[in-house]
Amino acid sequence: MLEALANPLLEGLHEQRIPEPCCIVIFGASGDLTRRKLIPALYSLAADHLLPSHLAILGCGRTDQTTEQFREDMKGGCEKFARAAFKQDVWDDFVQGLYYMPGNFDDDASFAALKTQVLEIEGKHGLPGNRLFYLAIPPSQFPIVGRGLASGGLTYKCEPNQPFSRLIIEKPFGRDLESARSLNRVLREGWEEEQIYRIDHYLGKETVQNIMAFRFGNAIFEPLWNNNYVDHVEITVAESIGTGGRGGYYETSGALRDMVQNHIFQLLTMTAMEPPISTTADAIRDEKVKVLQALRPLSPQEVPANTVRGQYVAGAVDGEDAPGYQEEGGVAPGSATETFVALKVLIDNWRWAGVPFYIRTGKRLPKRVSEISIVFRKVPHLLFKGAQIEPNVLAIRIQPDEGIVLKVGSKVPGAAMKINPVLMEFRYGTSFGAEPPEAYERLLLDSLLGDSTLFTRSDEVEASWRWINRVLEAWQQGAPPDPYPSGTWGPASADDLLHRDGRHWRHL
Ligand code: BG6
């Protein structure tokens, strides 16, 4: 077992600056994300003394409720979902800055009323005008609110000695290349690129950030991190849940848009990118964009042989009966939406030429597990006759049981030269004695601090859609998804994708 040196995990956060006083305005405040993730994340940051001394949070939503009702609801959310334990004194302090404003936020009058409200709150809390706007609303409303804020005089230009105005946008950022471009265009009418924070919550996960620390903070892995030593890379993001009551949304999305275009391509770029020249946001994002630009585009003829799409039918997960996708609420009968995707992706650059990246993600798979596995080449010469030597594998476990495992071959004790795989393991839980902070804590803190490293840049989003678009277009003309029973690892065609190359998915 590799043991971490004594630092508690939160030390990384404590080393940071404390953000300047600010007013956070959350659109979509009566929605699930605000109650389950955003307010609990802000509460946990408050409990860890990572928020500025002066801070106010204004929730905006369509639900007609008072500030008192909103506070009560958010208290329940913090008690249930916050990483930090609920403490009455922390809450009593935190709640002083929590407000609610009902409205549609779709016309000049509502943004004028919002401005009045924000100015009043800023006056009351002695805030200097710094504002962070969080859009946790349906994507169709992103342009309306983005524009309304800028034209309603709620923002400041991005200039020295001016208060900051920042805009956080939830996914999905577009549903294809054209809509992503158009959203970028609309937002840029009122906002500078450096004011726009496109969230991908996978980048807030400690294990995802650790890919960089692991690759570029150790001397022993990077020399092997290329096509001389790596046979292939597997990225699995498996979920055991179904649509989770979001059938209506999922019908407009599917697994390729919901998971691959954003989260999985982030994992891919972090794994495949070149060392950045520095740790500035742009230096890192420049390298990630290059990986996306180097993805070999699939022609319509190549799509069937390099992609698999599946849809779950009734089965059982964890011994419990599970319905088929088409029986879920909000799903159209005969729907051709994919709930599973497997892809073979090639990166046409010097480092990765000829190394396939196999990706799979799906709902209602046997368990929840996300892992990136670097599978190394076999030894060049088999010295031990008759021995079955398995290739070395470096597995980066994103969740659960966050950590890194290296599989090596070792002699089995005894007279014979028998070699078995053994594991060298690092686990966050045991090595640091603390659970990693929630992704949203890190992302909210970074956006308050003005650090956009863990947010996606416009060219990054467009480069990723450019690759995905070709697959979406070919699928529209192609066969419907292959069925797979809930509780299995997807359709048989996903196994064939690797078998054709003489490989198989790792058993997770
Ligand atoms: C979201 C997707 O972005 O990520 C969901 O819309 C998915 O469909 C979720 O379940 C997975 O996130 P996590 O953090 O649970 O792996």
Image (cartoon, grey):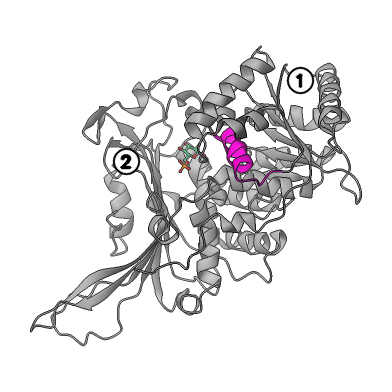
Placement of the N terminus among the 4 image quadrants? bottom left
Spot occupied by residue 424 in the image (x, y as percentages of width and height): 32, 69
C-alpha distance separating marks 1 and 2:
40 Å
Residue at coordinates 45% horizontally, 66% vertically from top-left? 4
Secondary element type, mark 1? loop
Nearer the observer, 477 or 200:
200
Magenta-tinted stretch: 37-51
Residue holding disc 2: 365
Relative placement, left or right, of 230 versus 40 is left
Residue kind at label 2, given as amino acid type: Leu
With respect to residue 423, does 258 lie above or below?
above
Q: Which residue bears the numbered disc 1?
A: 106
Q: Within 10 Å of the Cα at label 1, are there few (<14), some (14-19), or many (20+) other Cα atoms?
A: few
Residue 51 seen in render? yes
Q: Identify the residue at image location x=45%, y=77%.
A: 224
Q: Which quadrant holds residue 275?
A: bottom right
